[in-house]
Amino acid sequence: ETGVTQSPTHLIKTRGQQVTLRCSSQSGHNTVSWYQQALGQGPQFIFQYYREEENGRGNFPPRFSGLQFPNYSSELNVNALELDDSALYLCASSLGQGSSPLHFGNGTRLTVT
Amino acid sequence: AQTVTQSQPEMSVQEAETVTLSCTYDTSENNYYLFWYKQPPSRQMILVIRQEAYKQQNATENRFSVNFQKAAKSFSLKISDSQLGDTAMYFCASGTSYGKLTFGQGTILTVHP
């Protein structure tokens, strides 16, 4: 059974740039959730995708967008990067829309300078 | 909106002893779930234990158990026979589904030999 994998593991970008983070879900999972974890804080829910459709969104501006592909992998895109976007971005996969536990990846550490 | 509060930024315990981590939450929902997650230095969030709010019986998973007080909106985690591998950041979380969670600020637990 292949777990959740995220790429890249680390990334450094400049303010104003755009970034794409990638996530491969665990085998058999059709739902992907994305979270932002600032240093020393708990994760914050960004959005969830179920069968290629957005299925809920947290309190994040529209410059945070996502995609889910037919193989259930997912991308998180952030436009016009700000310094406060520096964080660990966690992807988690699960089966169905809400009754199975999340399986998290190891995250992507984004630094915006 | 849901809120989760962990009032203990740091805790420490001797190996083989018992420690309790505190968590309070606030929600207007009738049906919700509560979780404890562990995040070691590897950054991967690992599910420790979960509780469905409609169940009165406290959940247990081997050395981990919870004290769920629904009226008080309290959800503490007890770790018995603490092991060095329990050293990690622990997060309490709540949600109306497993995927869209609200996390607390975390408690750093250190187990000393």
Image: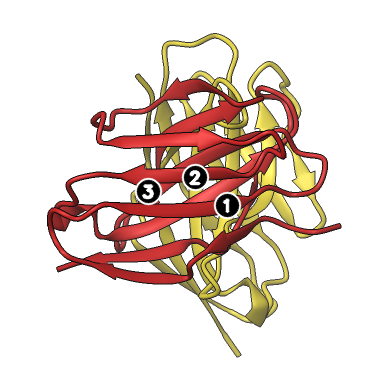
Chain colours: A red, B yellow
Q: Secondary structure at mark 3?
A: strand
Dot 2 or dot 1: first in sequence order is 1
Write down the residue under mark 3: A36
Quarter of the figure with residue B32: top right
**What is the chain identity of the residue bearing mark 1?**
A
Quarter of the figure with residue A12: bottom left
Tell me how far mark 3 sits from mark 1, CA to CA: 14 Å
Write down the residue under mark 2: A75
Q: Amino acid at mark 3?
A: Gln
Q: Give the answer, above or below, for where A110 lies relative to A54.
A: below
Q: Residue at x 55, y 74 (%)?
A: B42
Question: Mark number for residue A66?
Answer: none
Q: Mark 2 near mark 1, Cβ–Cβ under 8 Å? A: yes
**What is the chain identity of the residue bearing mark 3?**
A
Rendering coords of residue A51 (x, y %): 66, 25
- Taking A59 as reference, is A88 left or right? right
Quarter of the figure with residue B15: bottom right
Of marks 2 and 3, the one in the foreground: 2
Tell me how far mark 2 sits from mark 3, CA to CA: 14 Å
Tell me how far mark 2 sits from mark 1, CA to CA: 6 Å
Write down the residue under mark 1: A23
**What is the chain identity of the residue bearing mark 2?**
A
- From the image, which quarter does the N terminus of chain A lie in? bottom right
Rendering coords of residue A6 (x, y %): 56, 60
Dot 3 or dot 1: first in sequence order is 1
Q: Secondary structure at mark 2?
A: strand
For the residue pair B47 and B77, the one nearer the viewer reads as B47
Task: Sort mark 2 into few (<14), some (14-19) or many (20+) by Cα contacts within 10 Å.
Answer: many
Q: Residue at x 17, y 53 (%)?
A: A84
